[in-house]
């Protein structure tokens, strides 16, 4: 299973990915996690990924999928802790403008 | 690279076209890039080259070898001006110009994994060419170091991109 931690703070689910790679190798497991979150309906999720050092298109796709599916259900996703190569990829794909991105999970939780 | 070394330096490796072997050769690509970064003062080269390498390897496994698995050959050429990453497989060919050819950033609602991979490759590298030669697919991805050097001064202003 994808190394991760799920906690809940003030009604917001915080998913901390604890893998260095969010890519084609780990995404099949991440997809299961996303399905579990989507099954809960229109919830709010902070996707914390400061441990992730490398992301590829399949990793990006899983985040975008979570964002779009929860939004369609009336929920929301905020992304936190994007740095290094993932930050470079987010900027390349302009995801830093399309997704709500925060430096830390604590900052993402404020006013969510 | 350092004085006294015969250029271009060539590094080659061949692995089965399965995702579990991607990082074995990726380690070689990463190590070479980090050395070039150090010697050329070129920040961000490793991120860009590794991003392109991972996407290209994924595409080979998922598309070229979707039906019949085979080998992936990786050739890395390094000289004072550029790093060339060539990836060769013997799987099914594809229309490179039609597949994610757009230079436009994909809109969030139309973002697909396949198109995104080629978009990342094209944008991470200075130039990308694809050839179908006999039964081989040859994807040649070049990063010009002057691009890195020109932007590396921006790293001190918080721009990490190569």
Image (cartoon, coloured by chain):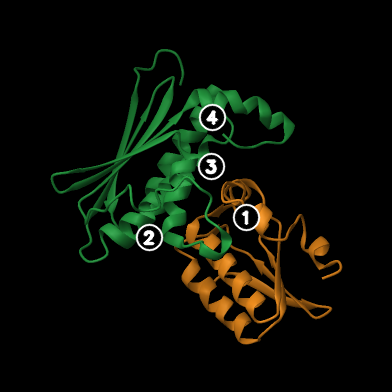
Chain colours: A orange, B green
From this viewpoint, which residue is outermost toward the bottom? A40
Q: Residue at x 51, y 22 (%)?
A: B146
Structural distance between the alpha carbons of marks 2 and 3: 20 Å
Q: CA distance from mark 4 to mark 1?
A: 27 Å
Q: Position of residue B73 (x, y in %)?
A: 27, 45
Q: Give the labeled residue for mark 4.
A: B37
Instruction: Indicate the secondary structure of the residue bearing disc 4.
Output: helix
Gap in angstroms between the C-alphas marked 2 and 4: 27 Å
Looking at the rendered structure, which numbered label has been put on residue B135? Answer: none
User: Which circle, 4 or 1, is nearer the viewer?
Assistant: 1
Please check whether the numbered discs 2 and 4 fall on a single chain. Answer: yes
Which of pointers 4 and 3 lies earlier in the amino acid sequence?
4
Check if mark 3 and mark 1 are on a common chain.
Answer: no
Depicted B60 relative to depicted B42: above or below: below
Write down the chain letter for disc 4: B
Give coordinates of residue A13: x percent, y percent.
73, 76
Q: Nearer the viewer, residue B36 or A31?
A: A31
Q: Which residue is mark 2?
A: B20
> Given contact means CB atoms under 8 Å apart, are the residues at marks 1 and 2 in contact?
no
Which numbered mark, 1 or 2, is in the foreground of this view?
1
Residue A1 in view (yes/no): no
For the residue carrying disc 2, how many other residues have a C-alpha within 10 Å: few (<14), some (14-19), or many (20+)? few
Chain letter of disc 1 in the image: A
* Residue placed under numbered mark 1 in the picture: A95
Dot 3 crowding, Cα within 10 Å, few <14, some 14–19, many 20+: many
Q: Which residue is mark 3?
A: B47
- Could you confirm whether marks 2 and 3 are on the same chain? yes
Could you say which is closer to the camera, residue A5 or residue A45? Answer: A45
At a point 35% along the width and 53% down the height, the residue shown is B99
Location of residue B12 (image quadrant): top left
Quadrant (top left, top right, bottom left, bottom right) of the C terminus of chain B: top right
């Amino acid at each position: 299973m994808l190394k991760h931690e799920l906690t809940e703070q003030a009604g917001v689910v915080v998913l901390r990915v604890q893998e260095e790679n969010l890519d084609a190798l780990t995404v099949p497991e991440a997809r299961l996690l996303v399905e579990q979150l989507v099954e809960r309906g229109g919830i709010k999720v902070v996707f914390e990924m400061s441990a992730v050092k490398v992301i590829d298109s399949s990793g990006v796709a899983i985040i975008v999928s979570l964002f779009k599916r929860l939004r369609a259900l009336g929920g929301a996703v905020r992304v936190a802790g994007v740095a290094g190569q993932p930050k470079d990829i987010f900027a390349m794909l302009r995801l830093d403008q399309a997704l709500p991105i925060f430096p830390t999970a604590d900052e993402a939780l404020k006013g969510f | 690279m350092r004085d006294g070394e015969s250029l271009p330096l060539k590094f080659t490796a061949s692995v089965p076209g399965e995702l579990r072997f991607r990082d074995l050769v990726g380690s070689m690509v990463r190590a070479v890039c980090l050395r070039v970064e150090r010697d050329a003062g070129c920040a961000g080269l490793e991120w860009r080259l590794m991003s392109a390498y991972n996407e290209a390897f994924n595409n080979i496994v998922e598309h070229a070898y979707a039906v019949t698995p085979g080998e992936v050959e990786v050739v890395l050429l390094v000289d004072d001006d550029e790093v060339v990453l060539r990836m060769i497989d013997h799987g099914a060919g594809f229309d490179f110009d039609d597949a994610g050819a757009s230079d436009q950033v994909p809109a969030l609602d139309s973002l697909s994994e396949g198109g995104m991979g080629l978009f990342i490759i094209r944008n991470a590298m200075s130039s990308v060419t694809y050839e179908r030669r006999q039964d081989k697919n040859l994807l040649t991805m070049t990063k010009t170091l002057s691009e890195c050097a020109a932007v590396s001064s921006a790293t001190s202003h918080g721009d990490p991109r190569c």
